[in-house]
């Protein structure tokens, strides 16, 4: 029998964070570990970090399989504290960030960076630069910013063709969960021939006019089809007449 998060013997603080991350049932946590949660919620790393020990101790979240803990690797206290401060608990997490992102870690000087690179080399972990991605995408004149290039790195996108393997939700994560930036990049990539993979939902800008999607996002914070379906009929009817045809067309299509 599946348990509700609220029924677990864990602190109210941890329960609240799990709810805020979208977890309501224990089964929602299945298949996840610290690393997968960090990847799923890159902008909420501090929250995942704050609850991981309690969830691991209680047995609701298992440690990553075959992952090497930073506490099992000889290193200077300086480097250890830097990794902890950046929510890195396992060596395999190091490959999820580019050299540039590591270099921006506070207090990571030249000698500590050398120490980090030596540890990675000893454990077969490759630290790569985002310069390769920038060079490969340069001919396409895509307006990705620095943070978005880091997102491309995390999604292992190194070429234009790799962009054909992602969903619009992946693009949303690459764009730091910024809806307007995602919409902008979606149209740019679509104009350049990118066809996105399907996912379990759809962003409204994928299926209705851009202006209507912008209005729904800006005025109501409604970004996806599932969010639109969760709206009460009386709320839908109160929307501006200019966007109602698009809204009702979506509801009618997905109701059939």
Image: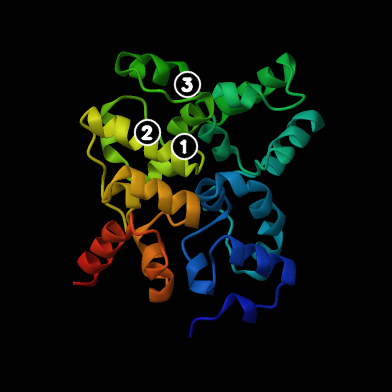
Q: Which residue is mark 1?
A: 175
Where's residue 244, x and y in %?
32, 60
Q: In percent of the image, x 37 and y 69: which residue is there?
A: 237
Asked if the residues shown at circle 1 and circle 2 are in contact, with their CB atoms under 8 angstroms apart, the answer is yes
Give the number of callouts: 3
Which one is closest to the eye, mark 2 or mark 3? 2
Up/down of 256 relative to 197, above or below: below
Left or right: where does residue 86 sit relative to residue 199? right
Picture layout, residue 236 above or below residue 148: below
* Residue 185: mark: 2
Classed neighbour count for the residue bearing mark 3: other residues with Cα under 10 Å, few (<14), some (14–19), many (≥20): some
Q: Is residue 11 visible?
A: no
Tell which circle, 1 or 3, labels the residue nearer the N-terminal end.
3
- Mark 2 / mark 3, whichever is N-terminal: 3
Q: Is residue 173 above or below residue 150?
A: below
Quadrant showing the C terminus: bottom left
């Amino acid at each position: 029998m599946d348990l509700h998060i609220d029924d677990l013997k864990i602190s109210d603080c941890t329960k609240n964070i799990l709810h805020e991350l979208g977890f309501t049932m224990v089964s929602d946590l299945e298949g996840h570990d610290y690393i997968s949660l960090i990847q799923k919620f890159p902008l909420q790393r501090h929250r995942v970090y704050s609850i991981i020990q309690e969830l691991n101790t209680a047995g609701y979240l298992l440690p990553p399989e075959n992952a090497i803990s930073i506490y099992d690797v000889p290193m200077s206290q300086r480097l250890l504290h830097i990794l902890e401060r950046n929510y890195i608990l396992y060596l395999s997490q190091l490959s999820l960030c580019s050299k540039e992102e590591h270099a921006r870690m506070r207090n990571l000087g030249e000698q500590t960076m050398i120490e980090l690179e030596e540890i990675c080399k000893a454990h077969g972990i490759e630290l790569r630069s985002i310069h390769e991605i920038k060079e490969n995408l340069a001919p396409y004149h895509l307006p990705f910013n620095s943070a978005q290039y880091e997102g491309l790195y995390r999604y292992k996108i190194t070429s234009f063709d790799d962009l054909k393997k992602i969903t619009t939700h992946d693009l949303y994560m690459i764009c730091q969960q910024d809806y307007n930036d995602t919409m902008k990049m979606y149209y740019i990539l679509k104009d350049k021939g990118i066809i996105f993979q399907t996912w379990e939902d759809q962003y409204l800008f994928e299926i209705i006019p851009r202006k209507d999607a912008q209005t729904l996002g800006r005025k109501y914070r409604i970004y996806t089809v599932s969010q639109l379906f969760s709206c009460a009929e009386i709320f839908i009817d109160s929307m501006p007449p200019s966007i109602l045809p698009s809204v009702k067309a979506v509801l009618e299509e997905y109701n059939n």
